[in-house]
Image (cartoon, grey):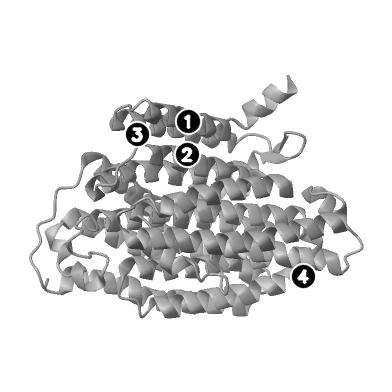
Amino acid sequence: MELLHDIYLYLPAVIVAIAGLAVMMLSAFQANHQTVLWTSVFLVAVALIRAGADLFAEAGYVFGGMAAVGGMAAFGTFIILLGTLFTLLLCHDYFEKAGEYFSEIYAIILFATTGMIVLATSTNLVTIFIGLETMSVALYVLAGSVKSDKRSIEAALKYFLLGAFSTGFFLYGIALLYGAAGSTSLEAIAAVTDKGLIYWAGTALLLTGFFFKISAVPFHMWTPDVYQGSPTPITGYMATAAKTAGFFSLMMILSRALESSHVQWSEVMQVIAVLTMVFGNVIALVQTNVKRMLAYSSIAHAGYALVGLSAGTLEGYSAVQFYLFAYTIMNIGAFGVIAYFERYRDLDLTELDNYAGLGYKQPLMGVLLTIFLFSLAGIPPMLGFAGKYLVFAAAVQSQLILLAIIGVLTSAAAAFYYLRVMVFMYMKTPATDIQLAPVGTVYTLALGFLALLTVVLGVMPWTVADILAAF
């Protein structure tokens, strides 16, 4: 009975795992593509609703303390499922137009999501590793899913090789922390009093593995090539849901296992945050490919989130959670619009020069992309502004004033490369005349809803902030 009760409390992950198996069976029996798509969407929506209800449930543990439910774990699950739902809605048109449509891609996305939820909610290093590898292996496959595009295959290979390399660091860190604590439980690691060389070496290697997954400098090398080469909706999925899972797992470890070592790891976080914000934004300034620009932008946004983590306070963790929620909404929207333009294989519409005049050729997509880019730049009253305000405010409250100032300055510099896309869309004459196809109804509604959330929650951010304050 206790096992059934734990499964009930952990229902969102269970639903998504069952959905992956169901979709795989439907694909095996060659079900209609629409059937596979809407089955995936329906089951993820059910899991999302349950995760939303869990936000107001009492926080606790399941499966003998191996995973957390409620509170921060529930919000991480909610963000991951939100990103997954919109990724599924945007994938259909993209892969169909690319001529690489296969139903199994939905099953792979669902299995990746299952791994993300396990990663974000685990309170034991063993289950953290299981979730991390379940997510990673699925993402390696998704990165190379457009088999006719050499860049997609290259992205998958680079991601796999560097991901396997980082896994070595992660596993070695787990082994050393187990040696220091005698257990892989986060609570047992928190109870360690003799913090010798083995403890600190394990902590350093474990954090290195996480820095790779969240694209923090200097462990970001894979990000631009993988994001550029991967199918664009999958790029958005990796940049949001996967990064959210990594950050929530990192917050679990910092707040539950390494809280007593806050002074030491906070100094490291501050250095990594500065390097990530400065490097990501400076390199993004000179990019001429929109996907590559957003890849470096993603690195910079990881730096902003690390500012909140550096504070090491409840306010800092809440701010990071809000920021990841905002980032998921606006970034999936931005990549969704780019995926629409990228359908035209004869003309590389990820190159900035080819965006000239597209705001007039497809006004709706132009307006939507403008909203998402304004939000990513942190321009009020968009949702991105509220997210940045909260993480910088948390840093100021913890007396990390210089770190907050660097964050504000780099964020201001970032406005240049976001606004440059709009300059090309509305103020440049197109070099070639292309006819854009109409946007599908589902595609339009999905992006429109994300844009609506970006504006409405930007005006009323307290609707989300109040929920986080209750954790």
Q: Which residue is mark 4?
A: 263
Q: Position of residue 300 (x, y in %)?
A: 48, 70
**Are dots 1 and 2 in contact, CB under 8 Å?**
yes
**Are dots 4 and 2 in contact, CB under 8 Å?**
no
Mark 1 nearby-residue class (10 Å; few <14, some 14–19, many ≥20)? many
Q: Is residue 428 above or below residue 21?
A: below
Disc on the earlier residue, 4 or 3: 3
Q: Depth check: give the residue in front, 202 or 15.
A: 202
**Are dots 4 and 3 in contact, CB under 8 Å?**
no
Which quarter of the figure has residue 348?
bottom left
Q: Position of residue 249 (x, y in %)?
A: 64, 52
Q: Position of residue 8 (x, y in %)?
A: 63, 26
Q: Which residue is mark 1?
A: 19
**Are dots 1 and 4 in contact, CB under 8 Å?**
no
Comparing labels 1 and 4, the label whose residue is closer to the camera: 1
Mark 2 nearby-residue class (10 Å; few <14, some 14–19, many ≥20)? many
Q: Position of residue 359 (x, y in %)?
A: 17, 63
- Residue 363 at least partly seen: yes
Comparing labels 4 and 2, the label whose residue is closer to the camera: 2
Amino acid type of the residue tagged 1 in the rendering: Ala
Disc on the earlier residue, 1 or 3: 1
- Outermost residue to the top: 1
> In the rendered picture of this protein, how many numbered marks are placed on residues?
4
Q: Which residue is mark 3?
A: 37
- Residue 254 at least partly seen: no
What residue is drawn where x is 12% and y is 71%?
430
Q: Which residue is mark 2?
A: 110
Disc on the earlier residue, 2 or 3: 3
Mark 2: secondary structure: helix
Disc on the earlier residue, 1 or 2: 1
